[in-house]
Amino acid sequence: MSVQLSTQPVEDGAETGTDILGVVTGGGWKQWSLNGMVAYFTSRLPFLSSATAVPVVKGGTGANNAVDARTNLGLVIGSAVQAYHAMLAGIVSAANVIVLGLTGIGYITGKGVGASVTQITSTATGVTIHNLTGAIQMLASGMSLAAGLETQFTVTNNLVAADDIPVVVIRSFTGGTPIAAVTAVNSGGGSFQITVTNTHASTACTACTLSFAIIKGASS
């Protein structure tokens, strides 16, 4: 193929069709204009009709419809590519506060999803913390739970729904022995109860911090 560039038109040959560039093609010089510059071709450009599928190896999809194109490119929805789902979209749009991968499953630190709170008065005093995860310092002045005894307090949290599952563990402690049992019970939405039981023969730790997280649940 021979190409000449010029700003002046020349005599065209017989036109017979339109190639993939939108250029009139035929037997003589073929003209194509771009930004005021005109290109003249001395041989017929490849002609592709709208029904011609460009092979993948040529930069196309090898198909004339979206379904076949995705198959040829290895992008079949539901197997090679995750289909759209409102719940997955919700995870992405939730300010990226959830981690789900090889590093674990849970909430991301530093996104404002967590908080901490400290009890006052006694180990039975309720606390208020409206977060999906956080830390609870039991009684700032220190706590003491004799052998075989337990204490219970309410955590008021407006993010807890009736089907949700509150999870609580001992985060840290100083002095005494570790408390053997910490449980949480959903109160029906809006709060949950934490029960701390000392099953040890000695007095429990004098400073205990609990960590909690709310797992969103559903009954239907």
Image (tube, rainbow, N blue to C red):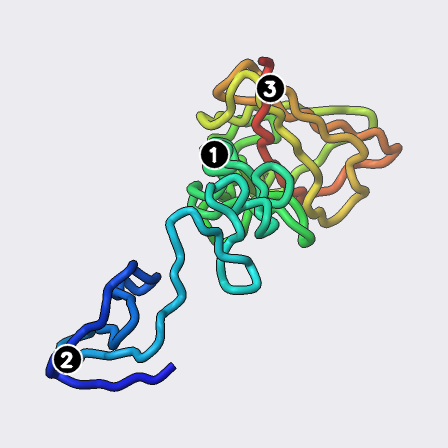
- Residue 162 in the image: above or below residue 126: above
**Considering only order in the chain, which callout, 3 or 2, is on the residue closer to the N terminus?**
2
- Residue 130 in the image: above or below residue 48: above
Give residue 194's position: percent from left, percent from top.
64, 26
Distance between mark 3 and mark 1 Cα atoms: 15 Å
> Which residue has dot 2 on it?
10
Neighbours of disc 1 within 10 Å: few (<14), some (14-19), many (20+)? many
Q: Are marks 3 and 1 in contact (CB under 8 Å)?
A: no
Neighbours of disc 2 within 10 Å: few (<14), some (14-19), many (20+)? few
> Which residue has dot 1 on it?
129
Q: Nearer the viewer, mark 2 or mark 1?
A: 2
Distance between mark 2 and mark 3 Cα atoms: 85 Å
User: What residue sits 24% from the left and 64% below the top?
Assistant: 15
The amino acid pointed to by label 1 is Ile
The amino acid pointed to by label 3 is Asn
Specify the quadrant that holds the N terminus.
bottom left
Give residue 160's position: percent from left, percent from top.
51, 24
